[in-house]
């Protein structure tokens, strides 16, 4: 069994649940040995952006080691970046050799936990007028040479993804990483996402880079 933990918190974007849990749910029809659950700090109910509610399956205290930890994004990321119990938890997860993958502004949380030190990374780039691009903020923290607008930046144990609907691409990438490209492609086909996946691939790169390359 290969297990994905999806870390959620108050004020995540609902689309990030669809881009992760929804895609994994479809993939499980192809690979039944895939398992996944939603994790939050205290367990139970969280409130997503604009009021939609979500029941998480586990709290930090219930967590058992997963193969992948997906850290979601949304307006609540800035609060989580100040929440030391969460940052400490993510550092502990890294010591278990779990692959930690950020979706959208989840990359800002990885940076706050110190998990992007010495690595290349990406995060959400596009914003509404008057907002500051998280990609620019991440570039200020890590340095412009370390941050790239991309679909996915894979540094081995730490993987970061682009913004919003690119979370679908991130989940498909991880499915391919663990179960093979054919499974990822078949999942995209059944999702009727193949054309968008190809278009995103033509527009933005997938980058693989070792931590020592910087």
Image (cartoon, rainbow, N blue to C red):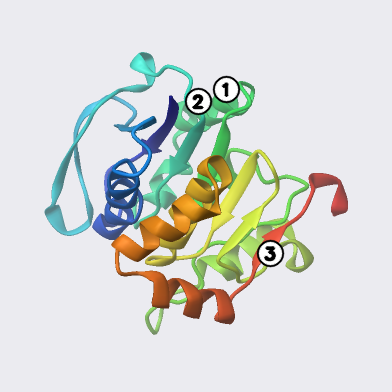
Nearest to the observer: residue 209 or residue 45: 209
Crowding at dot 2, Cα within 10 Å, few <14 / some 14-19 / many 20+, comes out as some
Crowding at dot 3, Cα within 10 Å, few <14 / some 14-19 / many 20+, comes out as many
Q: Residue at x 68, y 64 (%)?
A: 147
What is the distance, in whole Å, between disc 3 and disc 2 at their CAs? 24 Å
What is the distance, in whole Å, between disc 1 and disc 3 at their CAs? 24 Å
Residue beneath disc 1: 92
Q: Is residue 174 left or right of residue 28?
A: right
Q: Residue at x 33, y 52 (%)?
A: 23
Crowding at dot 1, Cα within 10 Å, few <14 / some 14-19 / many 20+, comes out as few
Q: Is residue 206 left or right of residue 168?
A: right
Residue beneath disc 3: 147
Q: Are marks 1 and 2 in contact (CB under 8 Å)?
A: yes
Q: Residue at x 38, y 62 (%)?
A: 188
Q: Residue furthest right?
A: 213
- Along the polypeptide, which appears first: circle 1 or circle 3? 1
Measured as percent of width and height from the top left, residue 174 is found at 51, 48
Nearest to the observer: residue 85 or residue 196: 196
Secondary structure type for disc 1: helix
Measured as percent of width and height from the top left, residue 72 is found at 40, 48
Please state the total of marks drawn on the protein image. 3
**Which quadrant of the rendered structure holds the N terminus?**
top left
Residue beneath disc 2: 89
Q: Is 111 located above or below residue 157 in the figure?
A: below
Q: Is 109 located above or below residue 104 in the figure?
A: above
- Along the polypeptide, which appears first: circle 3 or circle 2? 2
Secondary structure type for disc 2: helix
Q: Is residue 21 left or right of residue 123?
A: left
Nearest to the observer: residue 4 or residue 10: 4
Secondary structure type for disc 3: loop
């Amino acid at each position: 069994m290969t297990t994905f933990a999806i870390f959620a918190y108050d004020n995540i974007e609902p689309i990030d649940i669809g881009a992760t849990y929804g895609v994994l749910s479809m993939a499980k029809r192809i690979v039944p040995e895939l398992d996944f659950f939603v994790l939050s700090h205290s367990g139970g109910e969280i409130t997503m952006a604009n009021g939609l509610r979500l029941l998480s399956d586990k709290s930090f205290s219930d967590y058992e080691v997963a193969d992948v930890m997906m850290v979601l994004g949304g307006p609540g990321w800035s609060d989580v970046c100040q929440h030391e119990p969460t940052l400490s938890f993510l550092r502990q997860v890294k010591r278990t050799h779990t692959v930690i993958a950020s979706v959208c502004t989840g990359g800002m949380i990885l940076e706050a936990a110190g998990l992007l030190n010495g690595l290349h990374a990406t995060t959400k780039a596009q914003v509404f007028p008057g907002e500051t691009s998280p990609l620019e903020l991440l570039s200020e923290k890590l340095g412009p040479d370390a941050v790239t607008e991309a679909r996915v930046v894979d540094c081995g144990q730490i993987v970061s993804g682009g913004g919003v609907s690119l979370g679908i691409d991130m989940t498909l990438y991880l499915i391919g990483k663990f179960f093979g490209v054919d499974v990822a492609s078949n999942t995209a086909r059944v999702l009727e996402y193949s054309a968008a996946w190809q278009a995103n691939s033509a527009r933005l790169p997938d980058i693989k880079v070792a931590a020592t390359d910087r």
